[in-house]
Amino acid sequence: MDFVAIDFETANELRSSTCAVGVCVVENSKIVEGREWLIQPFENRYSKININIHGITPEMTADKPTFIEVWDEIKPYIDNRTIIAHNGENFERTVLEQTLKLYNLSIYDLSFKMVDTLTLSKNLFKHLKDYTLQDICQLVAVPFENSKYHNALYDAKKTAELGLLLYEHFTLDSNFNFTLDYVPKSRARRGSLLGSNKEEIAKNKEARKISSELKQMKTDVEDTSHPLYQKRVVITGVFQSFPVREEMAKLLYNIGADINTSISSRTDFVVIGEKAGPKKLEQIEKLGIATIDEQEFLKLFNL
């Protein structure tokens, strides 16, 4: 796994006002280099809002080179590379494009693939309230010092660590591509991935939601021998191995189960965790529906 994590900081409301760039080089899945540039933005103009975010002031860049003066140093870290950045599609790509344009250069003269760990995180951990680099790192137990947030080199390093962790724990190819068919690579890793925050996540109502696309039964299932294939399944309760319920739903979706959110006489199985609602427990007993506990569920998927 080779890539370069990158972070830009800007001096004011203009995306062309780059004042710091940090890069972190990963080769063979190991961080091998980190570099940072303080850059004098156009007219060295800063807004108070931006200063409050990253702490860089006009005095700190008054004698620093402009972007065009260091571009030959930065370019090799971008051109012909896989680049990852948190909110990279919306921010880093636009900042790079607008800053190059300021100096009559074009981003289209470069060849690179942009991987956005923010987008990855939204696909992997649905229904969270915030997806900042700080929040996602803390969620998946990547050590993060809040006081260093928005330091360009520090953010690049943390983005690199996050990218490596996501690649290690989830089924992503070398270009960080994955589909709805992703599964965590192991039960043990999934547990450590969410670290000490998993109980807090599990209690969150948003973490118990299941997206509508997963409630549409998959029709192109290759292996139809799974015992839950085309069975109506309801998930209820809290699960230690699956703080985010969507993970369970994806496993069920991929084997062709019919995922339901309410129990009825047509329900075949209820996957039941801790703290299941009393009304659902009453329904299960009244209707005589078969239940699957967390350990049984894990065995069904060889986890």
Image (cartoon, rainbow, N blue to C red):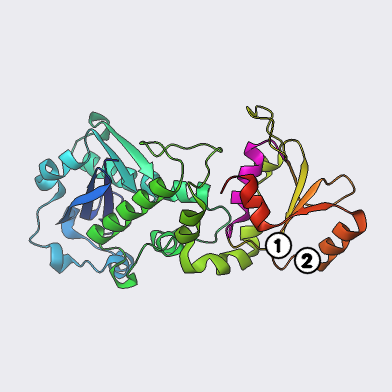
For the point 27% across and 30% down, the residue is 108
Q: Nearer the viewer, residue 227 or 210?
A: 227
Label 1 sits on a secondary structure element that is loop
Query: Taking 170 as reference, is 46 left or right?
Result: left
Name the residue beneath numbered marker 2. Answer: 277
Mark 2 and 1 residues: CB-CB less than 8 Å, in contact? yes
The answer to whether one can see residue 50 in this image is yes
Amino acid identity at mark 2: Gly
Q: Is residue 116 above or below residue 52?
A: above
Q: Is residue 67 above or below residue 48?
A: above
Q: CA distance from mark 2 to mark 1?
A: 7 Å
Would you identify the image quadrant in which residue 162 lies? bottom left
User: Mark number for residue 237?
Assistant: 1
User: Residue 22 in magenta?
Assistant: no
User: Mark number for residue 303?
Assistant: none
Q: At which x and y percent is residue 120?
A: 45, 46
Label 2 sits on a secondary structure element that is loop
Quadrant of the snapshot with the N terminus = top left
Q: Is residue 281 above or below residue 213?
A: below
Which residues, given as a range, are shown in magenta?
241-257
The answer to whether one can see residue 209 in this image is no
Q: Nearer the viewer, residue 288 or 155?
A: 288
Q: Residue furthest right?
A: 286
Q: At which x and y percent is residue 54?
A: 28, 66
Q: Is residue 175 above or below residue 265?
A: above
